[in-house]
Amino acid sequence: MNQSRFLLSLGTVSACTAIGLFLLNRLPGFQIHALFAWGTFAFFVLFTLLAFWYGSMAARSTNKHQFTNAFMVLTMIKMLFSLMIIVGYFFLAKPANKLFIVPFFGIYLIYTIFETALLMKLGRSN
């Protein structure tokens, strides 16, 4: 997958996610967590850019295990940061309800599927 195709795909996924997030944040229970949801959205977009950059470098490596290692490292870092974001928000913001987790996991799921498909294409193409 080349860079322009990746950016077009990321833009499409991000636009659809942003529209869904905008509509979800209009619901009364989710409005108070809108800033957290948009921050989560920004984090996953940036992480996906990092995953593409790191994955494309690893796919071009002469070491045939480098790409598998990159995939595992990206997955672990993403899960660790996700846990830190959720726990940090829970303890620092002390949300009145637990609805903040719904947009977080929705965004997490969307970008995890996108990244997995992206990395699978990168691994096959090189």
Image: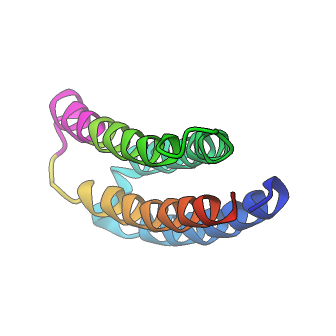
The vertical placement of 39 against 7, above or below, is above
| Residue 124, percent from left and from top | 61, 66
| Residue 85, percent from left and from top | 30, 36
> Along the horizontal axis of the image, is 20 left or right of 124?
left
The vertical placement of 24 against 45, above or below, is below
Magenta stretch, main secondary structure class: helix
> Along the horizontal axis of the image, is 83 left or right of 106?
left
Quadrant in the picture for residue 94: top left
Q: Residue furthest top?
A: 92
The structure's colour scheme is rainbow
> Along the horizontal axis of the image, is 85 left or right of 57?
left
- Compare residues 67 and 9 and report the one nearer the observer: 67
Quadrant, the C terminus = bottom right
Quadrant, the N terminus = bottom right
Q: Residue furthest right?
A: 4
The vertical placement of 63 against 4, above or below, is above
The vertical placement of 3 against 102, above or below, is above
| Residue 100, percent from left and from top | 27, 54
> Along the horizontal axis of the image, is 51 left or right of 90?
right
The residues colored magenta run 83-95
Question: Does the stretch in magenta take in 89?
Answer: yes
Q: Residue at x 63, y 39 (%)?
A: 62
Q: Residue at x 61, y 72 (%)?
A: 16
| Residue 68, percent from left and from top | 44, 48
Q: Residue at x 80, y 64 (%)?
A: 5
